[in-house]
Amino acid sequence: MKGFLVNLFIFSQLISFSNTLSGTLAGHAEQELTLYGYSHFKSIVLAKALLTQNGEFTLNYANDYKGMAYLQFSAKEQLFVILHQQNMKLAGTHLIEPNSIVFENSYDNTIFSNYGRVHSRSENILAGLKHVLPFYKDVVLLSPPNAFYLATLKEIDRLEKKDQEYIKQLHDTSYVKWFLPHRKLIGDISASVQKYPERIPEHIKQFREINFSHSNMVTSGLLANLIESHYWLLENSGKTLESMYAAMNKSTDALMASLQHYDELLNSTTNHLFDYLEKHSLLKASEYLALKMLTDNSCTLDNDLVKQLETYRIMKVGNKAPPIKAQGILLKNGKEIAENDNFEVLNNKITLVVFGSSWCETCRKEIPKLKNYYAAWQEKGVEVVFVSLDNEATAFNDFAKSFPWLSICDLQGWESPIVNNYYVFSTPTMFLLDNKQNILVRPISIEQVDAWVKHRIKNEE
């Protein structure tokens, strides 16, 4: 019976890992090779293998994985491959010499590698032609006039259509036929912003028509680049601020509508886009996304994502912030205050509430900088309260001992009632409150707080 169970386990493992990618890379003999794939917005390890003395290897990966992947020996030694067929083989010398690599039993990888070589040359020629084109437009010495200019225009048009024609002739079941238009869109955006702004409306239209719920998307490795490059395009397209946000909101509507019936991908995409917009200070766009998703009853959001989004609905500017009772360890100027004081700390004219911790690298750099502004702010009626997410008393004390303002830590970390009441999902997070606890500003930097204080005081004078 025991032997039967062992054999059954081995058999089940063979079923789970029935796909193989094997081959020879002579230049990497006796090195460890890793096969990476994609899951939503992350890279994942699919398999590892140690090459033989002759550079031979076999990588076994799960048979349910289909999509883009890459082989890697080091950060500079990578080769992208398509895992779309069983038992593929390749042969070559070195990953940094892609022209030496030949695929067997893989239609998709063969045409993908061929396309990469041809497309690269074509793009270089196209860039050169577009660079010289303006110089020949009105040159009267050419005979006949403008002949070269018109011929160059014709060649540019031919090269630009070449990609589309190449993709059209591919077999309908080819993974490359689905993949290349999306990858080309990402690659074209940067050049369009810098050199060909006339292309921008078409790029925007292409993004909004993408089917993000397509079965290939999760393992494509394209999700982050598609989304980030598009919103970067909108930010740098020369629109007014109002028009830019309107365009971003329209794209957000299209993106979320495409994912309406795919909750898992909708959650990961919302989370990634929200983080991107926040990090780039596109706060009106992130607020729009948050409120849209919280009021959408057609999808199920993860609890962590809901908490992240709720900060815009419950903790938005103009709303009243929850009270903060001074409980736990209380420090000011390095001295501990009696724990039983339990007083309300939001009783100042203006209060800057800062959430952070000693383990947060950004907090360690930014929060001590508050000391450069604190004395001047106090003169203007602005007080600071630091709420720590530390779990260890020693770490909190060491971090906050030099702070001249009140620092609070109940050692409960992310489970702290204060943290949950303020819907804090990242550190550092700041709120600027008036004497009635109304949220005046949600600053993204200390410099923004200082600018607000100076502007506010100047207007009052």
Image (spheres, rainbow, N blue to C red):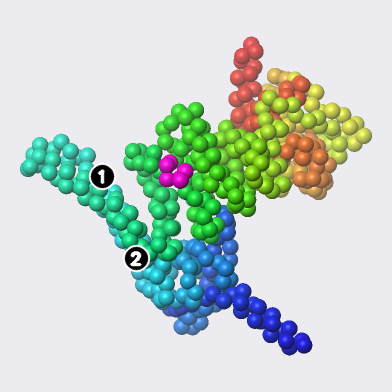
- Specify whether 307 is left or right of 61: right
Q: Quadrant of residue 428?
A: top right
305 is within the stretch colored magenta: no
Observer-side mark, 1 or 2, equals: 2
Residue that extends furthest to the top in the rendered view of this protein: 461
> Can see residue 382?
yes
Q: Position of residue 38 (x, y in %)?
A: 55, 60
At 63% from the left and 26% from the top, the residue drawn is 450
Number of residues whose C-alpha sits closer than 10 Å to that of mark 1, classed few (under 14), some (14–19) or many (20 or more): few
The stretch in magenta equals 204-209
Q: Looking at the rendered structure, which numbered label has been put on residue 114?
A: 2
Q: Quadrant of the N terminus?
A: bottom right
Could you give the CA–CA distance between mark 1 and mark 2, rounded to whole angstroms?
Answer: 26 Å
Q: Looking at numbered disc 1 in the image, what kind of residue is underneath it? A: His
At 62% from the left and 21% from the top, the residue drawn is 454
208 is within the stretch colored magenta: yes
Q: Position of residue 106 (x, y in %)?
A: 42, 72
Q: Quadrant of the C terminus?
A: top right
